[in-house]
Image (spheres, rainbow, N blue to C red):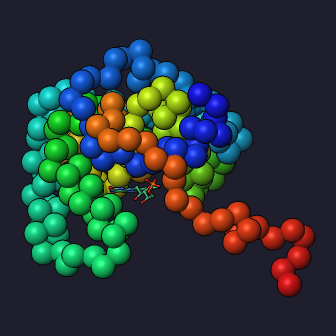
Amino acid sequence: MDVLEAMNSCTAMRYFQEKPVAKGEIEKLIHAATRASSPGNSQGWEFLIIDDPEVKRVVGEKVLAGMGPFFANRPTSDDAVEERMLKGAEHLARNFAKVPTWIVCMARKVYPPQDPQESFMHSTIYPAAQNLIVAARSLGIGTCFTTFPGMAEPDIRELCKVPDDLHMFVYVAVGYPERNFMPVKRKPVADVITWNTYS
Ligand SMILES: Cc1cc2nc3c(=O)[nH]c(=O)nc-3n(C[C@H](O)[C@H](O)[C@H](O)COP(=O)(O)O)c2cc1C
């Protein structure tokens, strides 16, 4: 698939088939992620792949314990798109353990070597994570960036023995889609572009 087409239809997928994603496919996604740019080519990224059903079950229970009250008490949104998104987010949280694979995108504070800064971890992990989701789309694999599993970060750290110097940024749900990919809805280019000088 053409890369522009993949970017254009890389919608957040919150509904997945239970069919597993093969190790080779996950490795392709990590290959794509690690083709990204990083500050000074420092490549301080790391990716934790979670597909162990027991780990997903324990983390999923923690996530639901944390998110359940929010979903139970949230008012219905007047905005249909937002309401659909929130319903999807709730479905994803409630079905955490059924998502075939979760990829935790992490980074180490390593740049610049003489005075490592936190901000460069963000600069490192987000281009890589975006490469990952576009590559997944091109392979017909759905993804959704999430941050809500962060409430189970201590559990993930303990269960998966994650070294302390790895910082967790975004948790990507990965699986074959149960819904269609759609064109993403974004602001028109004309609204966000300025050539040379603001008038
Ligand atoms: C850093 C980041 C965190 C996100 N966290 C969540 C999340 O916790 N739950 C969720 O359902 N979607 C999450 N999203 C997905 C966005 O909500 C989604 O991309 C946005 O609504 C646009 O929808 P689209 O990508 O399908 O066009 C996150 C996206 C980013 C970039």
Count of marks, rendered view? 0
Residue 168 locus on image (x, y percent): 38, 47
- Residue at 21%, 29% (x, y): give it: 18
Q: From this viewpoint, is residue 190 visible?
A: yes
Q: Quadrant of ligand 1?
A: bottom left
> Which residue corresponds to the image point at 71% horizontal and 41% vertical from the top-left?
40
Q: Residue at x 59, y 28 (%)?
A: 1
Instruction: Look at the image and tell me in which quarter the C terminus lies.
Output: bottom right
Q: Quick check: 84 left or right of 134?
A: left
Q: Residue furthest bottom?
A: 199
Residue 24: quarter of image: top left
In this picture, is 102 found above or below 120?
Answer: above
Which residue is at a point 35% across and 75% down the rendered structure image?
79
Looking at the picture, how far across and down is residue 85, in whole percent? Answer: 32, 61
Vertical arrangement, residue 118 with respect to residue 61, above or below: below
View extreme (right): residue = 196
Please say whether residue 143 is visible from this viewpoint: no
Front residue of 51 and 75: 75
Identify the image quadrant of residue 64.
bottom left
- The spot of residue 128 in percent (x, y) is 55, 40
Residue 6: where, in percent of width, then height? 56, 38
Q: From this view, report whether residue 14 is shown above or below residue 32.
A: below
